[in-house]
Every structure is written in C-alpha cells, then in structure tokens.
C-alpha cells in the first residue's frame, strides 16, 4: 500500500476548439486583426489541450508545466471572449467514476471556458498530488519529502480555490468530484498529507521529542478532520474503501505517536505517572490504527517502540517508582505545530507563460472601445446630419427661386452656366443609367440577406424542435437544459436583424419615390448640352437687369452660398477622418482601478477632439441663416424688376425642376451607394451570425448525441422493456454512429474583410460584428421608435434622432459576385419589392 493517497484525473472527450474560437474572434473583434493571424495560435492552443488531457502524462514537473500552460492560456482567453458566446461542447467525466466514458458514467457537458478552466485546474491539483505521492514513498530522502510537502500544499491551495469558485464559474449542478463538499474533503486530505511529510522529515532529522509530538498532534487533528469530511453521507460512495481506512488508521496512529513522543518528554522530566499513562494510551491507539488500516509502510516499527517503552516503564514503576497513573483524560493537552498551509493560487501557474492571443484585448476594454465608437459615431452623425439637412433645405429654397440660373439667363435662349455645370456633373456621374443600375441591384442584395437570415432561423428552430422531441421521448431522463432557454439571446438577435431588414425595405421605397419624382428631369440633365438647350422654352432677354442692384446683390450672396458649401465639405471630411486610439487609455484605466469609467473618459476625449469642429459647424449654420435671409430679400426686389410674361414663367419653372433634379440625383446616388454598402455589410454580419448559430447547433448536437448514447446504453442494460425509438426526424444521426467531427460548410463570403461603421435609416440598433446583443455584461442600448422619413431625407445616411447609436463596424473592402455565395442560388432577374412589382426602367 502506498504511503500517500493521490487524486485521480478527470477525463474528457476530444473536441474541436479551433473553428468555434476562430469564428468567435472574427465576429467579436472589430479590429484590423484578421482571423488568419490567430491560426497558429489556435493550433498551438489545441495542441496544448491534447497534451494536457489526452496524452499519457508522466508524474513529473514537465507534465505539470504543460497542464499549467494550458490552464493559464484558457484563463487569459476567458477574459477576452464573451462567456456566453463560446460554443464548444466541453465534456468532462467525474474523476471518481470508474465506469466507461459512455456507459452510465457521471459526466457533464458545458459550452463554457470557465468550466474547461475549472476541470483542467482540478487535474493540475490531481497531478500535484500524484507527484507528491510518488516523492513521498521514499521516506529517507530529504529532498523528496520537501518536494512532497510542496506539491501537497499547492494541491491544497487549488482545491480550496475551486471550492470557493466552482459554483459561480460553472453555474450549473457540477459532477460530484467538483462539488464544494468533495473539494473540501480533498483540500483537507492534501493538507494532512503535507503535514505528514513535515512529520517524516522531522523524525528523519532527529528533532526533539517535544517538537515531534506537536507535529504529530497536528497530523492527528488534520486527519481527524479529513476523516470527518470523507464520511459525509453525500460523499461516502465516491471514495475507495482504502482511502477511508488509510485516513482512519493514520488518524489513530498519529495520535499514538504524539502521545509516545510526549511520554518521552515526561521521561526526561521524571514524570513517571504521566509517562506511563501516555504510553498505555499510545499502545491502545496504535493497536486501533493497525486494525483500521495497513500503516506499517508509513510508520515502520513505531508500534514496537511504543509497546517496548510501555513494558519497560510499567516494570520500573511496579518495582521502583510506584507512581500513581492518572486518567488519560486529565492529562494536559499536547501542543500543535501547524507546519503545512495551503499555497495561495498564483496569478500564473506556468513559469514560462506566453499569451498566444496577446493582441486581443480584455472584454472590458473591448466593451469600452465599442461603447466609445458608438458615442464617437453618434457625434459625427449628428453634426454631419445637421449640415446635410441644412444644405438640403438651402438647395430646396434656391431651386424654388431658380437661383442662380435666373440671374445668369441673360439672353433667354442659352443655358445658364450654373445649369450647364449641373448637367455636366450629372453626365460625369453616369447619368440616369447609373441610378437605374444601382436600384436594380438592391432587390437581389436584399433577398440574399433574407435568405441567410431565414437559414439561420431555420437551423435554430430545427435544433429546438429536435430537443423538444427528444424531451418528449425520454421524459425526465432528458436532463440537459432546454434549447428554448439557451437560444433566447439568439432569437432576440434574429428578430432585431429581421426588423432591420424590414426598415431597409422602407428605405428602398423612399429612394424609389424620390427617383420617380425627378426621373424626367434627370433624363433631361443626362442629355447633351445642345439637346438640353433645345428642350428649354425661350424667354425675353433680361440682360438690361444685369447691372441692377438686386442682381449684383444676388450674385454676391450666391458666392457666399458656395463658400458655405465648400466649408461644409471640408468639415465633413474633418469629422470623418478623425481617428482616436482609446486602447491605451482604457487599458491604463483597467490596470489602475480594476474597472473602466467609459462614459467619463469618452466624454472628456470627445470634447477635446470634436469641440473645435462643433464650434465651426455652429458658425457655418449661423452664416447660412444670415445669407438665406439676404437672398430672400434680394430675390423679392429682382422679381419686381423682371418683365412678367408666360414664356418666362414656363422657362423659370423648368429650370427650377432641373436644379432640383440635380440635387436629387446626387442624393440618390449617395443613398444608393450607401444602401448597397449597407446590404453588403449586413451580409457579413449575418454570415457571422449564421456561423455563431451553426456552432451553437453543433455543440448542442454533440451534447445530444452523447446523451442519447448514455440513455441507450442504460436502457440496453435494463433486464426488461424495449428501448424507446428515436424521433423520426433524427434518422440521419443514429446514436450508434461515431461522433461527428466536421461541421457542415456555411455561407461565408470570399475575400470579405471586417464590415464598416454605417448608420441606417430608422433603426440604429443593429448588432455590431464585435458584440452581438444582448450580453449581460454589455451595456444594453434602448430601443428607438421608428421615425418618419420626410421627402428629401437621406434614408441610408445620418439619423436625425438624438442619442441613437451607430450600427455597423468598418465595411469589407470587396465582396464576390452574388452567385459565388454558397448555398444561395444567383438571382438573374432581380427581385421585386414587396407589394407591386416595380421596374425602374
């Protein structure tokens, strides 16, 4: 029989951690880092897991370091990944269950990095106990006893840590080996064996009897506590009988040894009565220890020493001293020397730890950066939106007044220079054909996104239906968490995406109406200059008014209008070009305070950066207000001076329409480009969302198949009663088949990079690629009511709603043709809008 007890390992099943973590990193982190950057890191992490859990490990420091490296890596990664987003089915078996892995064994499967960390930490403590036990077998080796004491104390510290954290980390009924009561018993056992190691070293060093007695007395107390915990009703079935008998024997033996050495102390003081009482008690205790368990290996000839000392002292007392033998209960207690103490858990268990994912930031920092980006984009959107709204209003007023064309039309037959410039701008931008082509593309992009979301929801609903059918089939034996509880955040997210797509349809309708209104005028502006001039009705010349005060005033004011527009273009570029790296600030705040006051830090930084630009915006808007007031006044005087005839009115009306069509054309082109970009960005987000659901369904399928194997095995072992058949829909996945190793391929765009930050029409609550809401640890943004989109409002651009967060991270640089997306057939003819079919041609 070995001198010390070693804790067995937990066993785990093989699992793919590369693909789910790659999907998680690529979807959660909206940084410049590409998933490819972490391929080698993920391979190394997978190798660490295999070496820590599957390879046969020798009981030495090298094996322990491999396990510690994996634990440290999981600990660091856990702080960088949202816990509820990890979809890896980690399955671990109870360390004390001796059955096969699938035949009725006690095991638990959770998709949780915390659970994986807890289980590997248990195995680290088990490895420490095994190394210590092997070292402690050589009681004559001083270094071996020191090493055994060290590892037992480290294992004790780990079991103490697990006992206090396991329930908060696992958040589900754990397997018996990691229940707090079990961990408490293992902690007590490790501490007792560490104290025993110190006892053996003390005796080997021939320390004084008084010291040895106190060390042994502490051993007796620790083993008594261990025995009490091992014999708890809830734990009795876990242990081997040898464990309990060994601990019980050692408890009695150490009591006997402490009494023996204290008796030797009494001998030195000539206290014969107390010496004889203690030796008599020690002799009785040692006999009890021998009946409880085989302790010969641990304590050698102590039983003989005690017996001989008792006989010699009794003989001397009978013939010489005749001392009164006191009752053992009346003897003064023996002191205790507590040499063994739990080693506190260090921050890093591995001495040579290197973070494989050092470029990934902790979750609090990532959350803070995302929240800051929301605030920053909100400021940019608000200021640019104000300027664009005022520009649209100013263009509308000028178009209604036929300015500046009215003061440039000196002959009544030629095109005004401003109208020539507008026609040239429209032609250079591609004319009406460009708008029509962009509009034709939207239905196909919309349908592609709908199909991806439909497929994601189909997988989610199918998995839930499968779980419900198995639950109805196996009743109370189907013990895993219902899918309808686990998939609720995913369903909420899918509903949000569905609302966003419907809002996009409304935005497309706004674009369609605006195009229909200005289509004829845009066609005219797309014509050559000669044809456009021929289409305009002639009017009597107004050249005689060229030198009038009102005309000169209007020309001056129109120059100011151009200055206002030029300044706004510069301001818009300045707002959009601002880049702020908040990583250092947030990392410093987290390191200094242990938390991040994101709102305060963001408000201070945004004020410093955007304060001067916001001041320039206010001055620009005030300038416009004064200029437009002057234009209204000067135009009234100009109209009074003009000769009023019918041809002039018709010509003015047509030129107003052409000026308005130019502005509408530029808005439509921007709207449609932003709409196309929006749909492509949404495609990337939905593909990531679909991958997330696929990982969830795969993890649930793995757990389902394992549970089916266990249930089928248990049913097959029953003497009577047929095994229930599987649900009909499950015919493609027999419980007798081996575990599925590969996930089905998913629709993933080729050459797609991280999506861009893009607000959208009436709903800015779109989940970001970096943080799919709702996570309990993320700030939950409020739900914003849909606002009407007035004619002229840019439906794909900046929202007028105060406080609405932005929707998207940076846009992919390129997207493949629609037909290249797997699982989604090409749409050659385009897709009609909901309702009546519409042909923009």
Image (cartoon, grey):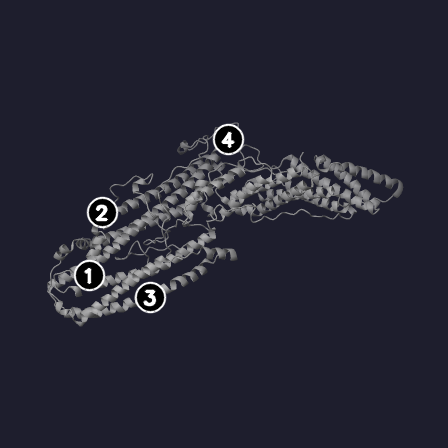
Q: Quadrant location of the N terminus? A: top right
Look at 45% across and 55% down and name the residue there: 583
Residue 407 quadrant = bottom left
Q: Which circle marks residue 838 in the picture?
A: 2
Q: Which residue, given by chain and number where applicable, does mark 4 sit on?
A: 713
Q: Which residue, given by chain and number where applicable, does mark 1 sit on?
A: 418
Residue 698 drawn above or below residue 383: above
C-alpha separation, residue under disc 2 versus residue under disc 4: 61 Å
Neighbourhood count class around disc 3 (C-alpha, 10 Å): few under 14, some 14–19, many 20 upward:
few
**Of marks 1 and 2, which one's residue comes earlier in the chain?**
1
Q: Is residue 220 left or right of residue 399?
A: right
**Of marks 2 and 3, which one's residue comes earlier in the chain?**
3
Q: Is residue 673 left or right of residue 469?
A: left
C-alpha separation, residue under disc 4 versus residue under disc 1: 85 Å
Q: Is residue 73 left or right of residue 153?
A: left
C-alpha separation, residue under disc 2 versus residue under disc 3: 42 Å
| Of the two numbered discs 3 and 4 in the rendering, the one whose residue sits closer to the viewer | 3
Neighbourhood count class around disc 1 (C-alpha, 10 Å): few under 14, some 14–19, many 20 upward:
some
Q: Which circle marks residue 618 in the picture?
A: 3
| Of the two numbered discs 1 and 3 in the rendering, the one whose residue sits closer to the viewer | 1
Look at the numbered disc 1 and give the secondary structure of its residue: helix
| Of the two numbered discs 2 and 4 in the rendering, the one whose residue sits closer to the viewer | 2
Look at the numbered disc 3 and give the secondary structure of its residue: helix
Q: Is residue 536 left or right of residue 137?
A: left
């Amino acid at each position: 029989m070995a001198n010390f007890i070693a804790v067995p390992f937990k066993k785990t099943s093989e699992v793919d951690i590369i693909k789910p973590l790659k999907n998680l990193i690529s979807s959660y982190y909206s940084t410049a880092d590409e998933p490819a950057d972490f391929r080698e890191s993920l391979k190394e992490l997978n190798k660490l897991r295999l070496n820590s859990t599957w390879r046969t490990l020798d009981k030495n420091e090298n094996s322990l370091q491999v396990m510690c490296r994996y634990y440290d890596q999981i600990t660091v990664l856990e702080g960088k990944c949202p816990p509820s987003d990890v979809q890896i089915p980690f399955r671990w078996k109870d360390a004390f269950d001796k059955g096969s892995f699938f035949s009725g064994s006690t095991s638990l499967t959770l998709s949780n990095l915390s659970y994986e960390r807890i289980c590997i930490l248990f195995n680290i403590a088990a490895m420490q106990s095994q190394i210590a036990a092997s070292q402690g077998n050589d009681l004559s080796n001083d270094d071996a006893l020191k090493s055994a004491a060290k590892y037992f104390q480290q294992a004790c510290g780990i079991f103490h840590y697990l006992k206090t954290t396991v329930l908060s980390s696992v958040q589900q009924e754990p397997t018996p080996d990691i229940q707090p009561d079990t961990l408490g018993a293992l902690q007590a056992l490790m501490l007792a064996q560490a104290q025993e190691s110190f006892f053996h070293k003390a005796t080997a060093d021939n320390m004084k009897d008084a010291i040895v007695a106190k060390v042994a007395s502490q051993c007796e107390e620790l083993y008594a506590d261990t025995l009490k915990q091992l014999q708890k009703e809830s734990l009795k079935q876990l242990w081997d009988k040898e464990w309990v008998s060994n601990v019980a024997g050692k408890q009695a033996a150490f009591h006997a040894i402490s009494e023996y050495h204290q008796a030797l102390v009494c001998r030195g003081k000539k206290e014969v009565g107390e010496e004889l009482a203690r030796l008599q008690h020690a002799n009785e205790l040692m006999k009890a220890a021998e009946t409880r368990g085989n302790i010969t290996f641990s304590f050698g000839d102590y039983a003989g020493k005690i017996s001989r000392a008792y006989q010699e002292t009794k003989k001397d007392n009978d013939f010489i001293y005749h001392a009164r033998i006191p009752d053992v209960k009346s003897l003064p207690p023996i002191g205790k020397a507590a040499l063994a103490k739990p080693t506190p858990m260090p921050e890093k268990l591995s001495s040579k730890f290197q973070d494989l994912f050092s470029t990934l930031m902790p979750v609090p920092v990532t959350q803070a950066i995302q929240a800051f980006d929301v605030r920053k984009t909100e400021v940019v959107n608000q200021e640019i939106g104000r300027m664009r709204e005022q520009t649209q209003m100013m263009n509308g007023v000028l178009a209604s007044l036929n300015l500046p064309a009215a003061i440039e039309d000196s002959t009544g037959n030629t095109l005004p220079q401003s109208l020539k410039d507008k026609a040239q701008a429209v032609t250079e931008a591609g004319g009406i054909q460009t708008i029509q082509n962009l509009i034709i593309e939207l239905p196909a992009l919309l349908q592609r996104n709908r199909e991806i979301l439909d497929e994601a929801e189909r997988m989610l609903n199918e998995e839930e239906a499968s779980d419900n059918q198995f639950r109805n089939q196996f009743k109370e034996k189907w013990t895993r968490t219902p899918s309808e509880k686990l998939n609720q955040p995913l369903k909420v997210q899918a509903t949000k995406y569905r609302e966003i797509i419907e809002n996009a349809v409304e935005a497309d309708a706004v674009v369609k109406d605006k195009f229909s209104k200005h289509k004829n005028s845009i066609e005219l502006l797309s014509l050559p200059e000669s044809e456009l001039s021929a289409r305009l009705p002639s009017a009597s010349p107004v050249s005689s008014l060229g030198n009038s005060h009102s005309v000169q005033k209007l020309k001056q004011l129109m120059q100011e209008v151009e200055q206002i527009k030029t300044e706004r273009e510069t301001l818009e570029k300045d707002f959009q070009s601002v880049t702020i790296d908040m990583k250092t600030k947030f990392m410093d705040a987290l390191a200094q305070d242990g938390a991040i006051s994101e709102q305060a830090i963001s408000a201070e930084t945004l004020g410093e950066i955007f304060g001067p630009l916001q001041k320039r915006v206010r001055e620009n808007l005030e300038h416009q207000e004064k200029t437009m007031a002057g234009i209204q006044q000067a135009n009234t005087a100009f109209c009074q001076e003009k000769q009023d005839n019918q041809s002039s009115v018709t010509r003015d009306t047509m030129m107003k329409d052409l000026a308005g069509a130019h502005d509408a054309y530029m808005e439509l082109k921007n709207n449609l480009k932003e709409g196309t970009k929006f749909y492509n960005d949404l495609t990337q987000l939905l593909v990531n969302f679909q991958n997330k659901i696929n990982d969830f369904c795969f993890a649930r399928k793995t757990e389902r198949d394992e549970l089916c194997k266990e249930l089928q095995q248990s049913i097959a072992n029953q003497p009577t009663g047929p095994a229930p058949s599987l649900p009909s829909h499950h015919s493609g996945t027999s419980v007798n088949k081996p575990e599925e190793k590969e996930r089905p391929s998913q629709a993933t765009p080729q050459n797609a990079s991280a999506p861009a930050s893009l607000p959208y029409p009436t709903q800015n609550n779109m989940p970001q690629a970096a943080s799919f809401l709702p996570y309990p640890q993320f700030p939950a943004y409020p739900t914003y009511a849909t606002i009407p989109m007035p004619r002229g409002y840019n439906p794909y651009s900046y929202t007028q709603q105060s406080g609405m967060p932005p929707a998207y991270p940076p846009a992919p640089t390129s997207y493949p043709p629609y037909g290249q997306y797997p699982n989604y057939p090409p749409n050659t003819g385009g897709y009609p809008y909901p309702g009546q079919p519409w042909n923009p041609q």
